[in-house]
Image (cartoon, rainbow, N blue to C red):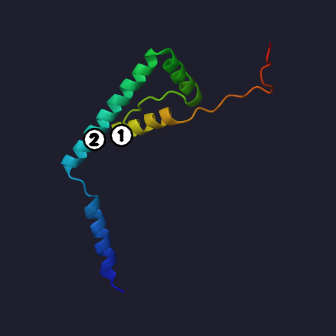
Amino acid sequence: MDRTRKATREGNEITLQHMSPKEAFLIEELVEDNLTQLLASVEQLKETPEGSTELQRRTKAFGECQRSEGETSRQFYDKLRRWLDQDIPQTKSPLHPPRQVE
């Protein structure tokens, strides 16, 4: 068995995962842009009655989604995206359907 094979493979994987500082900067810039757009969308939602109601329901169901201290833009973007995409649990449905009054 060739013992150097595993070491070579691990070295190749590390090389493939390496990101130049310029690439990392571009990715962070893209994340910042996405976060800015998402926060602008949330602000627009607050201005409409339906959006405001939706955000209040989400806050009641999941709590506030605030950026915590030391949280990176990428982490906050992921957290806010999950908060917005998560399905709100349905409230209890009535035992009997409403009567049809004719």
State the quadrant of the C terminus: top right
Assess whether mark 2 and mark 1 are in contact (beta carbons under 8 angstroms): yes
Residue denoted by label 2 = 28
State the quadrant of the N terminus: bottom left
Figure check: 21 above or below 32: below
Figure check: 69 above or below 50: below
Mark 1 closeness class: few <14, some 14–19, many ≥20 residues within 10 Å: some
Figure check: 43 above or below 6: above
Residue denoted by label 1 = 74
Give the left or right position of residue 65, taking residue 95 as reference. Answer: left
Q: Residue, x 36% and y 40% (percent of image)?
A: 74
Q: Earlier in the sequence, mark 1 or mark 2?
A: 2
Mark 2 closeness class: few <14, some 14–19, many ≥20 residues within 10 Å: some
Residue 95: image x %, image y %?
A: 80, 27
Q: Secondary structure at mark 2?
A: helix
Query: Marks 1 and 2, how far apart in space?
Result: 8 Å
